[in-house]
Amino acid sequence: MSELRKDPILDHWVIIAAERGYRPSDFKAEVPMAYTGAGCPFCEGNEDKTPPEVFALRAPGTAPNQPGWEVRVVPNRYPALTIEGGLNRRGLGMFDMMDGVGAHEVIIETPHHERHLADLPVGQVVKVLIAYKARIEDLRRDLRFRYILVFRNHGWIAGASLSHPHSQLIALAITPRLVKEELTAAREHFARKERCIFCDLLNQERALGERVIFETKHFIVLSPFASRFPFEVSIFPLEHSHDFTLMGSEIMEDFARTLKETLLRLKRALADPAYNFLLHTAPNPVPRPGRPEYWGTLAYDYHWHLEIMPRLTRVAGFEWGTGFYINPVAPEEATRFLREVEAED
Amino acid sequence: MSELRKDPILDHWVIIAAERGYRPSDFKAEVPMAYTGAGCPFCEGNEDKTPPEVFALRAPGTAPNQPGWEVRVVPNRYPALTIEGGLNRRGLGMFDMMDGVGAHEVIIETPHHERHLADLPVGQVVKVLIAYKARIEDLRRDLRFRYILVFRNHGWIAGASLSHPHSQLIALAITPRLVKEELTAAREHFARKERCIFCDLLNQERALGERVIFETKHFIVLSPFASRFPFEVSIFPLEHSHDFTLMGSEIMEDFARTLKETLLRLKRALADPAYNFLLHTAPNPVPRPGRPEYWGTLAYDYHWHLEIMPRLTRVAGFEWGTGFYINPVAPEEATRFLREVEAED
């Protein structure tokens, strides 16, 4: 069982996943493990190499954990958190901790090993989004969890350990610090102005224009004003919505097309860079003590979005120790390059 | 001129150093540049390959920018910030920005190319600390600067571009977010308890014992309770002190010995890992408007310390997007390994 620990000075939590049993010598030569190739546990036909699936979109008549699926969700074989047990929140003097309870799942995006998410047909990307939505909705029913984080690591240096296209999902008993800061900023802005801070931001970005990469009917893709990394990109729904899972099917198809086009532009402009993306959506409803049928805030003043961070530069001590970043590419410059690149499939 | 930009949602600043003129193709194959070898601008005899020195400890009778130095401080040839000009603080709707004014200097720790800081004699480490102190004191006189950050990148993946032993220093017009959070926590704790939060923490860690790697007369070296990275280490002065520059010579010598021993233990336990270290000390005094002779708070309730972060794991999307870290090595485990390693030079 891993442990969640809160820093006694700063407001951040860490998962101490010591169970993996690392020794100092494990770190002496971290080299890419077998990253592609045969025996991939995510390939069709190798379903027995993963834990049993918790969700799949599959051809009619095919059985779970057998071939015939289009998207498949399985628990992570090496989870940072485990699903069983209570949180066991406890303190020791200045220290706060709880048991490492949560879910850690893998969304296998396609049966085909070599197809980048950017290269999948829009219909297949929609299926990946349907899987995100289904898993978030299911895990939200578990009252221990406060936040469901969907993310994707593409490329070895971005943290991927297997090259078969996949995303991940972690269900957490706490809301992560950066998300909480966004939620607080949104709440305070709404209290003052009765407007969404992100809607205001999008309004300003559309008026200024210089950081808008492209727009679709329902989405805007832009380089954030204070991008921490070169070619950082955010995708926002144009119409206010706090919750990713509330998207109807027309908007979801537009989002799939927008996501695919964004990833394709990055892939072409930067020669298939490693990247991470993260879905920022509203936290789970919080039950009131003793009255689980009454839910706390759903953070209606939040505005869901997806953040994409290409991993092009090394991050040095300066950034780690201060939360203060140096970005060598102006977001306006990045916008120009990403606008110009050919985006047709 | 680079630009400082504040995120319109989150409380963080970014340096947009677009002057370096990167193009997307620059990122296509980031490979280590010539990292060691001849023509090193930091080696003795190559003083003309750096901007003129701003500080040096040198043999009597030797001239500036000539051989004969033991420690030498020069402006960074590719500074993220520039020293001339006013801050030009300005806003545009929801955006806050200012000119990229600041200092960016390199502390060359020894004339010898191949000597790791951990391998230098204690007397030489003292000289490096004297240089840190002298530069902080000098730059604090510049009323545009709020924070002087001293840091060290060791190894390519930790961000070092040259292997010759050196530290860096950046003088900033803002206090970085993580330091500000520490300052706020210290101030709030002091307001409530009239005690330093770090002193309380050290007291608890000494009572529990399991994360204390070693102690000297004046310093304690420990693995933080909520370490974000494997083998993260912090060094604190045992006696409360908010400001690194107030150390007397006896304490400074003890700190040099402590720092050297800590780096040596990491080097031996982890086969010379890449690492970053950062000095966290009190921010600069703030002049009152119109009355530069009156200084604002000196943050007496802060407690200076040095944070060392070995770079052993890849940091994935999960961490970037949430501020929530997964650490595969329990700090107590790291402590045991670092205690056991042979630390004599």
Image: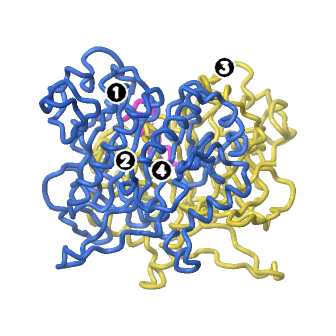
Chain colours: A blue, B yellow
Q: Nearer the viewer, mark 1 or mark 2?
A: 2
Q: Earlier in the sequence, mark 4 or mark 3?
A: 3
* Whether marks 1 and 2 lie on the same chain: yes
In the rendered structure, which amino acid carries the disc numbered 3? Answer: Gly
Say the numbered circle drawn on residue B37: 3
Badge 4: chain ID: B
Lateral position of residue A214 relative to residue A107, left or right: right
Label placed on residue A162: 1
**Residue at the extreme front:** A250
Task: Confirm whether circles 1 and 4 share one chain.
Answer: no
Residues under numbered marks 1 and 2 in contact, where contact means CB atoms less than 8 Å apart = no
Provide the residue span drawn in magenta: B256-273
Residue A298 in the image, given as x and y percentages of width and height: 36, 69
Badge 4 and badge 3 in a common chain: yes
- Dot 1 and dot 4 residues touching (CB under 8 Å): no
Is B272 magenta? The answer is yes
The answer to whether residue A156 is visible is: no
Query: Residue B5: x and y, percent?
Result: 69, 57
Name which of mark 1 and mark 2 comes first in the sequence: 2
Instruction: Give the label, 4 or 2, closer to the camera.
Output: 2
Q: Mark 2 = which residue? A: A150
